[in-house]
Image (cartoon, rainbow, N blue to C red):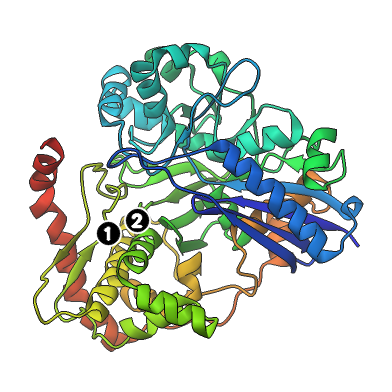
Amino acid sequence: MTYTLGIDLGTSGTKTVLFDLHGHAVASATVEYPLLQPHNGWAEQRPEDWWMAAQRTIRSVIADSGVDAADIAGLGISGQMHGLVLLDKAGQVLRPAILWCDGRTQAECDEITRRVGRERLIQLSANPALTGFTAGKILWVRRHEPELYARARHILLPKDYVRYMLTGELYAEMSDASGTNLLDVPGRRWSEEILAALDIDPALLPPLLESCDKAGAVTAQAAALTGLKEGTVVAAGAADNMAAAIGTGVAQAGKAFATIGTSGVVFAHSDSVQIDPEGRVHTFCAAVPGAYTVMSCTLSAGLSLKWYRDTFCQAEIQAAAEMNADPYVLMNEQAAQSPIGANRLIYLPYLMGERSPLLDSSARGAFIGLSAMHTRKDLLRAVMEGVVYSQRQNLDVLRGMNVAPQTMLACGGGAKSPFWRQMMADVFGMPVQTLENAEGPALGAAILAGVAAGLYTDIPTACQRLVKAREPQLPDTARSAAYEPYYQLYRSLYPALKDSYATLAAL
């Protein structure tokens, strides 16, 4: 039997899943690693931790499945976007990677906007200069760590580093490169104009591939470390959300998904370039060659719930451990005991600043309406509602661009919760579906590997064969009406607090 391997390099950990050619998960393994926050608003990780996690999870799934490594036809990698990895001439990591949720580069983003021009930057890169994106990070290192920057010879994104360690080949690919502010997105090539304006040497950037292209093969050294067979095909892979789109079957116009992972995304496929002139949502190259995506990003979606769990739910964590249960299940049960609107309490999920649709790295989280009557159940429900309101606000932007669907596919950790999915259906006002295979990004990466290895004709054909949706959860009219005034109030709060956030950031 033939298999493919999907590696999902996330922010909290790396998950590797082995699939058969019907898309069924045969074995999976996850290894977590730390998020480094040396200053408020900063976020870094060690690329070496990603590579070690990839080694351990690959070895684990091969051992647990009992599969002969020679039967694994190929592997693909899904990766967190925007992170800056700098290598020296020997291919060694120069510093911890600066991540997608890092907010230190506002001054550099302002510089990019001045140098390129905001309108021209959006025309070329399909996005404004944002603190999460890679270009600002490059300028920050050049300004604050000039000696280190002078030693840099290669700029990579997170998954491209792990692929480099597997193959010894330096490549980037279209979907991930779309999130650098350095790609000519309509032209699907590095932008000579932007690079010249920012005085970035094009030689630092690797050649570009499409996501399903072959990007090399497993080296003898990587085979010894992972248990893979030398020569195993490695696909170029895709950015996490673009891989999730493939893993959820969002590979043609009219389809979309919403995910609540560490970040939260609303993602729609488009066969042509659709750009929001205000830059509130992102346009990227899709993992499907020649196609595009429109997507939003809530920076602290599942991260908000994880923060709440780690800060306030030690009793639930302990009880879950004693019951051999998931603490999030107990938390969902508690949140359900609070009414819609969480007893007039609203949460703003801006723990790491906010990207879509606010574009404000100074924004911070808040509970609005907190009173002595509120319990942890109310705070918990408010957190979950605030995340969904953020998703709805971005969905409304996609609706204005005429790329929103009639039915939403749900994936990510939040999609495992029937309570949260029903909240999404009610707030979105549309059916919400999950899939029989919930692996999302890992399955998408494995599908890309299958195309690169010649097992599938193309991505849409593979999706039709492998991705099956379950019956949807339908919105309840009465609940949708009950949520609406809270959502409208939610929308009004950021404009009222915007100046206060800027003042606080300057103190």
Splitting the image into 4 quarters, where does residue 312 fall?
A: bottom left
* Figure check: 224 above or below 484: above
Residue 12: x and y in percent read 50, 54
Disc 2 target residue: 300
Instruction: Judge left or right: residue 378 versus residue 143.
Output: left
Q: Amino acid at mark 1?
A: Pro
Instruction: Judge left or right: residue 231 versus residue 9.
Output: right
Instruction: Judge left or right: residue 305 versus residue 24.
Output: left
Considering depth in this image, is 178 or 498 the residue closer to the camera? 498
- Residue drawn at (87%, 61%) of the image: 67
Disc 1 target residue: 349
- Real-space Cα separation, disc 1 to disc 2, in angstroms: 6 Å
Whether pointer 1 and pointer 2 mark residues with C-beta atoms closer than 8 Å, the reply is yes
Query: Is any atom of residue 20 visible in this view?
Result: no
* Figure check: 490 above or below 115: below
Residue 268: x and y in percent read 47, 56
- Residue drawn at (51%, 68%) of the image: 409
- Residue drawn at (10%, 70%) of the image: 369
- First of labels 1, 2 by sequence position: 2
Q: How packed is label 2: few (under 14 Cα within 10 Å), some, or many (20 or more)? A: many
Query: Is any atom of residue 331 visible in this view?
Result: yes
Residue 63: x and y in percent read 81, 60
Splitting the image into 4 quarters, where does residue 114 fall?
A: top left
| SS state under label 2 | loop
Considering depth in this image, is 110 or 261 the residue closer to the camera? 261
* Figure check: 199 above or below 401: above
Residue 13: x and y in percent read 55, 53
